Amino acid sequence: MKGPLFYSKILLFGEYGIIKDSKGLSIPYNFFKGALKRDKNNSEMAQESNRSLKSFAGYLKMLELKEEGLVSFDIEALEKDVANGMYFDSSIPQGYGIGSSGALVAAIYDRYALDKITVLENLTREKLLQLKEIFGKMESFFHGKSSGLDPLNSYLSLPILINSKDNIESTSIPSQNTEGKGAVFLLDSGITGETAPMVQLFMENMKQEGFRNIIKNQFVKHTDACVEDFLNGNVKSLFGNLKQLSHVVFDHFKPMIPSKFHQLWQNGIETNDYYLKLCGSGGGGYILGFTQDLEKAKKALKGHRLEVVYNF
């Protein structure tokens, strides 16, 4: 038994902002992937995954009762497979902000949901929102609160444009220019990030009027502009807005940036060689970088490995 593959995702724009109705843009990242497996695997990873799936099955059983009519699963088949040692075989690093639990949720929905919404049907906005709600409730098991976007991205394997909480659509992004000098890249912070405490911190900060104004008047404004620029291929304008966004995050989201990256973050803004931003909730995991000259960025970030995600 080997399930279909589900990919990791990268939220290019919209981290934290989408909680407060900014635009967002999420793309599948097929460098990392996962699938449900049921072979004889006694590794620690497989056993841990199996234990986690057992708890998850119990949670889904309760979810069916609590959210009647939202989603139902073939729990019997799921429990049987888990009892037979099923695990999620994944290369997606956990706590890195690229959707490790999202891929698992998508895989479970794909295999065990009854009357599921499939990728092949006409995905109306209503169906996308319904899927997002189902996935949000499912993924809450891992994060406490989830928007449902990571699993949605993983399940559809399509870029998703978030216009607002109630308005999402699948979209296409400009084709990559493999000859181009510019790039979006991932930078490994070398430490794992925890989503829940970071989101909690953000929600605490949102109680202060000053912080709320910064989010609304600066963070959301530049995020929305970045999404528009990226989708329309306005590279020059994009980098202007990225610089502003990187600045706002550096000034107001410091706890979400691992301390050893504070200097690198500032250097990028000062030299314009690259701009850094959070990838997911921050606190560790990957940091997202944008540059108009990849070779220059590599020199400036010497000693760090850059994983290129997209070429301009």
Image (cartoon, grey):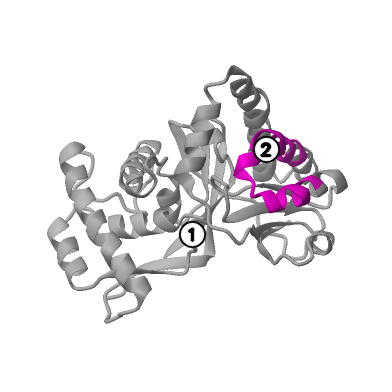
How many numbered discs?
A: 2
Give coordinates of residue 46: x percent, y percent. 33, 72
- Residue occupied by mark 1: 8
Q: Magenta part mainly helix, strand or loop?
A: helix
Residue extending farthest to the right is: 271
Q: Is residue 255 magenta?
A: yes
Mark 2 residue type = Val
Residue extending farthest to the front is: 259
Give coordinates of residue 134: x percent, y percent. 31, 43
* Residue 153 makes an appearance in the image: yes
Element assignment for label 1: strand
- Is the C-beta separation of discs 2 and 1 under 8 Å? no
Please say if 167 is above or below 61: above
Front residue (pair 149, 234): 149
- Residue drawn at (65%, 37%), measured in percent from left and top? 228
The magenta segment: 242-266
- Residue occupied by mark 2: 249
Please say if 276 is above or below 183: above
Please say if 32 is above or below 258: below
- Residue drawn at (56%, 39%), measured in percent from left and top? 24
Q: In the figure, is residue 159 to the left or right of 4? A: right
